[in-house]
Amino acid sequence: MEHAHHHEEHDPNVPLEYQSEIGRLNILGFWIFLGAEIALFATLFATYFVLAPMTADGPLPTDLFKIEGVLIMTFLLLTSSFTCGLAIHELRRHNQKGVMLWTIITLVLGLGFVGYEIYEFVEYVHHGATLQSSAMWSGFFVLAGTHGLHVTIGIFWISFILMQVKKRGLTPQTSAKLFISSLYWHFLDVVWIFIFTGVYLLLMMGGLSPHGH
């Protein structure tokens, strides 16, 4: 029966987030959740690509999309992915201050991304592009908006985890939460790369020829 408590002896060679049974189960559960998220975004992408040519009488995306704005959003989110990775590197070194610092920088960059995306959306609406304008704009706003909502949820979630780290320190439980939230953040960055290339760049390069519907 003594081996039941064996895992409480923390093996320095095992990452902190894997040192508790709950942590390992949570990480496994998260991968299953991520599968559902991939299915969600795959469905939204498929729907968008079906609707993309249907601009009806709405404004054309080529008239509204500005490469500068898209590059700013991409830079903010990709940089946040890098700082998120640095936070996990500090987690491996059991450096709580480093974890806190890089995670806060990640959140600030994420807030910048969400803020700029909201600004861009307001600009589009101002120029007549709304959910009702055309099938293309409906697909675009639902896809990009769902991603933006996920980033916003991620910011609140990671902020909550940071408060736990500040209160309890780097334990196997808080480390598992940090690790899971970093996977989630990297996933959102990958989704954005698909939105950046498959939506913005493709449309700005005239990759999807619009027609009225």
Image (cartoon, helix red, strand yellow):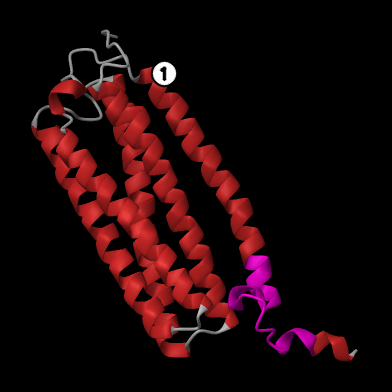
Q: Residue at x 47, y 88 (%)?
A: 169
Which residues are drawn in magenta?
6-26
Magenta span includes 154? no
Q: Residues within 10 Å of mark 1 (few under 14, many from 20)?
A: few
Is residue 213 rendered to the left or right of residue 186? left
In the depicted structure, whether residue 113 falls above or below residue 9: above
Q: Which quadrant of the figure contains the N terminus?
A: bottom right
Q: Which quadrant of the figure contains the C terminus?
A: top left
Q: Position of residue 205 (x, y in %)?
A: 25, 20
Q: Residue at x 68, y 86 (%)?
A: 10
Q: Position of residue 209 (x, y in %)?
A: 29, 11
Q: SS for tag 1?
A: helix
- The amino acid sitting under disc 1 is Val
In-front residue for pair 71/42: 71
Q: Residue at x 12, y 27 (%)?
A: 128
Name the residue tied to disc 1. Answer: 50
Magenta span includes 10? yes
In-front residue for pair 12/23: 12
Q: Residue at x 44, y 32 (%)?
A: 44
Q: Position of residue 66 (x, y in %)?
A: 15, 33
In the depicted structure, whether residue 51 falls above or below residue 40: above
Quadrant location of residue 131? top left
Quadrant location of residue 126? top left
Quadrant location of residue 50? top left
In the depicted structure, whether residue 11 falls above or below residue 160: below
Label total for image: 1
